[in-house]
Image: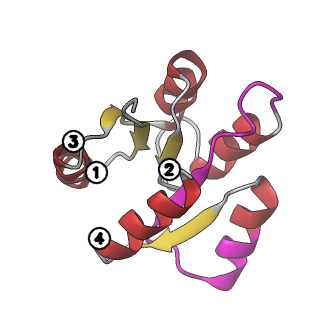
């Protein structure tokens, strides 16, 4: 079976590194980006199987990145997990409106994130 490719878009170096390490240990092919523009470019060029996307990012915020991918015929099928410290209901609602497939708040339980990933990668 082919390795699933995951794109992590987050400007927190420690969190991005920890997630990358953990996912690679679970045999995922992991790409990462430090800002919204880089994340959008990598999503378009590398065609990941799933994107873990922070909201508060330099250059383009996560809402814009999500919307640009979900309203693009070539990329709208890619599941996107919004992954953010913004836990207010209105943020979750906006995420849903932008096309996010899931919304997980930080701090997070790794098992919750992994479970949601497995569910979306089926």
Which of labels 3 and 2 is toward the front?
A: 3
Give the distance between the C-alpha atoms of the residues marked 1 and 2, in whole angstroms. Answer: 12 Å
Asked if the residue under mark 2 is in contact with the one under mark 4, i.e. CB atoms within 8 Å, the reply is no
Is tag 1's residue or tag 4's residue first in the polypeptide sequence? Answer: 1
Q: Which mark is residue 110?
A: 4
Q: Secondary structure at mark 2?
A: strand
**Where residue 51 sits: x, y (%)?**
51, 44
On the picture, is 65 further left or further right than 86?
A: right
Residue bearing the label numbered 1: 12
Give the spatial CA distance, label 3 vs label 4.
14 Å
- Going from N to C along the chain, the mark reached first, 3 or 2, is 3
The dot on residue 24 is 3
Q: How would you rate the neighbour count of disc 4 (Cα within 10 Å): few for under 14, some for 14-19, many for 20 or more?
A: few
Within 10 Å of the Cα at label 3, are there few (<14), some (14-19), or many (20+) other Cα atoms? some
Picture quarter with the N terminus: top left
Mark 4 or mark 2, which is nearer to you? 4
């Amino acid at each position: 079976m082919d390795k699933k490719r995951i794109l992590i878009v987050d400007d927190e170096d420690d969190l991005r590194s920890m997630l990358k390490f953990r996912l690679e240990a679970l045999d995922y092919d992991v790409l990462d980006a430090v800002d919204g523009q880089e994340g959008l470019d990598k999503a378009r060029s590398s065609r990941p199987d799933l994107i873990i996307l922070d909201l508060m990012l330099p250059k383009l915020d996560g809402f814009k990145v999500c919307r640009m991918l979900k309203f693009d015929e070539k990329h709208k099928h890619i599941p996107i997990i919004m992954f953010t410290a913004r836990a207010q209901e209105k943020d979750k609602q906006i995420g849903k409106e932008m096309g996010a497939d899931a919304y997980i708040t930080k701090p997070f339980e790794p098992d919750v994130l992994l479970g949601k990933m497995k569910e979306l990668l089926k």
